[in-house]
Amino acid sequence: MKQYSILCGLFLALMATGCAAALIGAGATGGYKVATDERNADGMWDDSAITTKVKNKLLKDHTTTAMQIDVDTLEGNVFLTGVVETEQESKRAVEIAKNVPGVKKVTNNLQIGERTFGQSVDDTVTGSRIKAQLVVEPGIRSLNIDVDVHNGVVTLTGIVDSSEQRKRAIEIAQSTIGAVRIVDNIKVINH
């Protein structure tokens, strides 16, 4: 119930600031993302299916707060980020992810502790700032980099063409107000 209240409050805040259109328009970016992603269509499909299966299993498991766990998959490698209450919950989330068919490796970036509503808002602002900077950065396909922020810890996950792009994305995140630490899950694919 608490999570629902937080989500409703966040949505109302976005509507009040005129950002609700960004939520609605976000679906339109899907087609562009597919066209610019470095992975082939089969790889993207497989990763999407793995992410969905992991998230569904987390939701069905009553020992994890699945709504606090972000799941990203890149070439069969699953990355878990977010904030959970206990070490046992973190271990359980990793165990669940490892048991999903197609998962090659699980990287646990989960933090143990609490996340206040204020911190959640701060994290949203920090993530938005980083994404905005990535969008205007020449040579970086911003939709190929997922940005997650939890308690000021920024996790960058995705695929880029060069080590220079990877380095620049990390620099952007590091220089953003609100970023406490950067976790680099960016893979460089040379063509």
Image: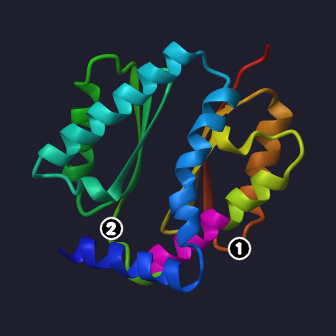
Residue 191 colored magenta? no
| Rendered residue at 23%/59% (across/down) | 86
Residue 71 in picture, x, y percent from top left: 39, 42
Q: Which label number is shown at residue 89?
A: none
Looking at the picture, tell me which residue is in the foreground, 185 or 133: 133
Residue 173 in picture, x, y percent from top left: 71, 57
Segment tinted magenta in the rendering: 119-128
Quarter residue 82 falls in: bottom left
Disc 2 residue type (three-letter): Gly
| Rendered residue at 61%/45% (across/down) | 29
Residue 179 in picture, x, y percent from top left: 64, 66
Instruction: Examine the residues drawn in magenta and state their main secondary structure.
Output: helix
Q: Residues within 10 Å of mark 1 (few under 14, many from 20)?
A: some
Q: Earlier in the sequence, mark 2 or mark 1?
A: 2
| Rendered residue at 34%/77% (across/down) | 8
Left or right? Give the position of 187 relative to 169.
Answer: left
State the SS at label 1: loop
Q: Circle 1 sits on which residue? A: 177
Counting the numbered discs, the total is 2
Q: Circle 2 sits on which residue? A: 113
Left or right? Give the position of 139 relative to 105.
Answer: right
Q: Residues within 10 Å of mark 2 (few under 14, many from 20)?
A: few
Disc 1 residue type (three-letter): Ile
Left or right? Give the position of 54 relative to 60.
Answer: right
Q: Is residue 180 visible?
A: no
